[in-house]
Amino acid sequence: MNGESITSPVTSSGNLIADRRYRFGRDLAGRGDFDAAADLFVQALEAAPAFAPAWFALGEARVKLGDDAGATGAFHRALAIDPDDHCGAALQLVRLGAGDAAHAMSRAYVRALFDQYAPRFDAALRSLAYAGPARLREAIEKVRPDMTFDHMLDLGCGTGLAGAAFRSQVRHLTGIDLSPAMVAQARTKQIYDRLENDDLVQFLATERNIGSVYDLVVAADVFVYVFDLAPVAAAVAAVLCPNGLFAFTVETHGGDGVELGEKLRYCHGAEHVCSAIETAGLRVRAISPVATRIEADEGVPGLLALAVRPQATDDIPASP
């Protein structure tokens, strides 16, 4: 999504006065009065010093006030209290030059983000002219004109937008997503034969262990929440049948490595994408520029990658 702050699943500090001041502070911040909001967050923390969401909100307010040092301290306190990082304090620290981008995207943050977006996710993407699944389908159809697949895996399936785009060409469709609320939305559409709520790499490792095999794996705008693509590419390779296809989109930038963008999504360079595919023992069939959505009246720069598993099974390394 657009990198906006989220509300922690921890909704109460256990102190009524702290909770009230926190809520008032958030309301003032929403109106743009960050000075008054910061004062209220400080008061809330005086009453409940271990309330991580208030520390996070204080950090956000201090950023708006130009107090980067104060913001950094607040985000560090939020992260110390909530090591799982539901609010995304580590990402904010990267923005401030005080964190490591490679380890900043916590599972708890991604899960909380999409659990909150789930009820309005489809509408939000319609407003952005989202076309990720359509672009993936077009790319796959160029190399497989018959578009017939026995088993497809939709990584980060969300509410089922990619599943809907491919359903008519797939005999058995599996979807996996980290967010329970997104999976619940997908289930209401009755698109998938199987839906699972799990971490992508963990799920793929389990599938490999039980002998599951897919002839198509897609990931539509999922890897913007993954720093290093090598582990997930290797895990996908381990469940692809010979000649199976792996197609995905990423956001990109002018360089070759991985950067955390302003919208708190990872941007991958073409060199990183190709290296991850080839290190996994797959072959790049195509990699091309793509814009899967519009933000601020401009297409967001991205890449669409299409890889194939070679026929020789001994070309595929063991999954980590």
Image (cartoon, rainbow, N blue to C red):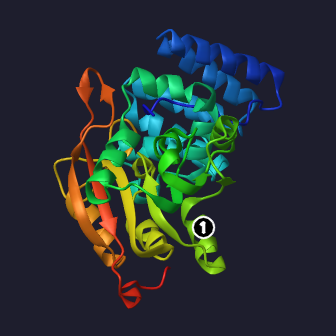
Q: Residue at x 74, y 30 (%)?
A: 11
Q: Residue at x 60, y 42 (%)?
A: 78
Position of residue 98 measured from the top left corner of the image (x, y, whole percent): 39, 49
Say how many tags the image has: 1
Position of residue 143 measured from the top left corner of the image (x, y, whole percent): 27, 59
- Left or right of residue 60, residue 287 in this image: left
Task: Please say whether residue 280 is visible from this viewpoint.
Answer: yes
Position of residue 245 measured from the top left corner of the image (x, y, whole percent): 38, 65
Location of residue 7 with respect to 276 vertically, above or below: above
Other-residue count near label 1 (Cα within 10 Å), few / some / many at <14 / 14–19 / ≥20: few
- Left or right of residue 288, residue 149 in this image: right
Location of residue 163 with respect to 319 vertically, above or below: above
Position of residue 153 measured from the top left corner of the image (x, y, whole percent): 53, 58
Q: Residue at x 37, y 57 (%)?
A: 247
Observer-nearest residue: 235 or 308?
308
- Left or right of residue 61, residue 197 in this image: right
Amino acid type shown at disc 1: Gln
Residue at mark 1: 202
Q: Which quarter of the figure has residue 159?
A: top right
For the residue labelled by badge 1, is the local secondary structure a helix, a strand or a loop? helix
Q: Residue at x 63, y 52 (%)?
A: 84
Q: Residue furthest front?
A: 146
Location of residue 21 with respect to 141 vertically, above or below: above
- Left or right of residue 80, residue 184 in this image: right
Location of residue 212 with respect to 182 vertically, above or below: below
Q: Which quarter of the figure has residue 58?
A: top right
Q: Quadrant of the N terminus?
A: top left
Observer-nearest residue: 201 or 15?
201
Task: Please say whether residue 260 is visible from this viewpoint.
Answer: no
